[in-house]
Amino acid sequence: MTPEQAQQEIESLTRQINYHNDLYYQQHHTEISDFEFDKLLEQLIALENQFPQFRYPDSPSQRVGGTITKEFQTVVHQYPMLSLGNTYSEEELTDFDARVAKGLDGEEYEYFCELKFDGVSISLIYEDGLLVRGVTRGDGTRGDDVTANIKTIRNIPLKVHAPHLPKRFEVRGEVYMPREVFLKLNKEREDIGEERFANARNTASGTLKMQDSSIVAQRKLACYAYYLLGEDTGINTHEEGIHKLEKWGFDVSKTYKKCHQLKEVFNYISHWESRRGELPLETDGVVIKVNSLEQQETLGFTAKSPRWAIAYKYKAESTSTRLNGITYQVGRTGAVTPVAELEPVFLSGTTVKRASLHNANEIARLDLREGDFVFIEKGGEIIPKVTGVDLSKRKPDAKHIHYITHCPECGNRLVRVEGEAVHYCPNASGCPPQIKGRIEHFIQRKAMDIDSLGEQTIRQLYDLRLVKSPADLYDLTKSDLMKMEKVKDKSAENILKGIAASKEAPFESVLFAIGIRYVGKTVAEKLAKHFKNIDRLMEASYDALLEAPEVGEKIAESVVQFFKAHENRKEVERLRKAGLKMAVEEKEIKPVSNVLEDRSFVISGVFQGYERDALKDTIIAHGGKVLSSISGKLDFLVAGENMGPSKKEKAEKLGVRIISEEEFNQLLAGKKIG
Ligand code: IVH
């Protein structure tokens, strides 16, 4: 492909992707499938890596992340990020209204009501329409620059296209993790034996502070904008600001309402109190703002919060019901979860029958006794939780509830690791839910993707003693399968086809599928990339594992333990024999040009426009050579941020030319450098 063709193609792909992105996030409708969308994005990223000079500053490829931020820079807010005063009753709100009326000295005024979104507040700075910075609230005066992570949030415009834009403006909003995304993430965490996250808000907040923006991208955060700030925005009311934000492509929750009287504000509050479960995120109240900016200015601020706005907080929805007993669920990793079985009770829109009690500490903390009446609350995530015991209803002789000592499924004695809250059933190879759970984990989409099998089939296959481990799947015959209920010729063939097709799954999927504790899909991908094949991974020491990206002590220890176990090694060998991929397939790099011919490179540090591997591929695609160590024969050391000092020293000593990423891009464009 010639550079001219590449430029045209990058332009066209960028345009198409932006079009579909806007369609999805602003008009909530789609014309192509997720798969097709991802394909377009992949093509764009590949081309941009080969021809970085043609990448647009607001390229949608930034949405997938890739930059690593070691430490976030502190940035002073141009306008401090204040908090809001809280009210909890109509009386308190009436007092607020009286203060506003007095402050405005008899002038007419109106309110603009919005929901108070329970996420993480963010300040987004735009210059010449381009998103230049995203900063957390921090202490209100200064926050962390989390721009790389913010850019992965797909409903935050990277560039605003509109006539008469102010040169510089700031948008405030709330970054959140949609309820659905949060529930799915927790399910995935449970699947790999990780502790569940407590709530969506903290998860969103933790995610924004992650160092690897590609992981942030996978977490699918979203943002609601609710405030436009700037010198020359040309607005006179908050409402106009909100409409501008909508026009400029920001996602504004359509739940706002202008109210002329306090009574309408009360109606708004009670309207959303009963409907807040329908929203994609939790709201803990309502924000009431004086609409006119001039009046806002008249009212001014206290040290901490504006006098022109206030929050009204909803009470947590709670009720009490009888605890009928506790049951215990055993998961794939053997973790035991106690569940409160409740006398069914209606709570904000649904009937609640069960609530998770998490672990033994929680039962002890609540000091639960048989026959207790417990208070339950619906958290923002709609999973009810037990918050306490109604002691007024406790019988004096109520018996203590003791945590089980043996597995309810296989009878094995439970163990509890020092310092951990959770009890485990250690009988991994003989405990039915653990066995079935491992096979379910193995066949899931992100793993071997065998969609001709499901929970029901696995249960039957297990009950018929046909399958006790994932490797057994590959020994199944048609007649085996036809022993199952309702499975005829055709469906048996279909199942076999699905199993056979799974042999094409890439190594990283196999690595995720075999179910090493704490190894999720992302970590499996990093391990596969780093170790290249299963044999090197199996032999890797604890220290060698720690050198792989994303791997900390917990994961390293877990991998070592996994491969220490004889039965796991045996299982891997059986899977290998069955024909599963146990090594990464080196991708073929298509030659693009020969501008770097006869030149050798070592790369070091972190780069703005490339992931390390992409930079290596680019060099090779343009005819260059990538070396791993510095010698006198080396032509260039490409220096990224945080380059190791020893590399720099060595290069200087040997007189090797050190070039920046920018200079590298010039070389690539066929230009001479300085
Ligand atoms: S306006 C000066 N509007 O609540 C007033 N804040 O306690 C600026 N919040 O840190 C805030 N939803 O993160 C405003 N619709 C909304 C909001 C909202 C949530 C958060 C925000 C802020 C906190 C104030």
Image (tube, grey):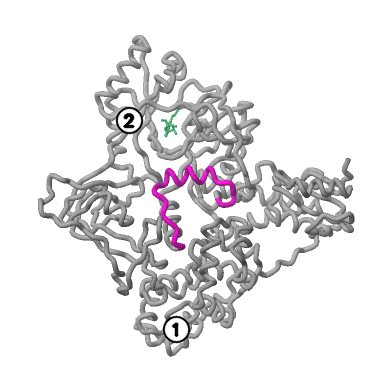
Q: Quadrant of residue 76?
A: top right
Give the distance between the C-alpha atoms of the residues marked 1 and 2, in whole angstroms. Answer: 59 Å
Query: Is residue 200 inside the magenta stretch?
Result: yes
How many residues crowd around disc 2 within 10 Å: few (fewer than 14), some, or many (20 or more)?
many
Residue 312's tag is 2
The region drawn magenta spans 192-215
The residue lying furthest to the bottom in this view is: 479
Quadrant assignment for the N terminus: bottom right
Find numbered disc 2 in the image and state the secondary structure of the residue it sits on: strand
> Quadrant location of ligand 1?
top left
The residue sitting at 47% across, 45% down in the picture is: 204
Residue 331, position in %: x, y? 38, 66
Q: Nearer the viewer, mark 1 or mark 2?
A: 2
Q: Is residue 491 above or below residue 70?
A: below
The residue lying furthest to the top in this view is: 105
Q: Amino acid at mark 1?
A: Ala
Q: Amino acid at mark 2?
A: Tyr
The residue lying furthest to the front in this view is: 418
Query: Is residue 363 inside the magenta stretch?
Result: no
Q: Nearer the viewer, residue 269 or 471?
A: 471
Left or right of residue 444: residue 427: left
Sequence-earlier tag: 1 or 2: 2
Q: Nearer the viewer, residue 211 or 225?
A: 211
Do we see residue 295 in this rendering?
A: yes
Left or right of residue 98: residue 304: right
Residue 492's tag is 1
The reply to whether dot 1 and dot 2 touch (C-beta < 8 Å) is no
Q: Nearer the viewer, residue 158 or 530?
A: 530
Find numbered disc 1 in the image and state the secondary structure of the residue it sits on: helix
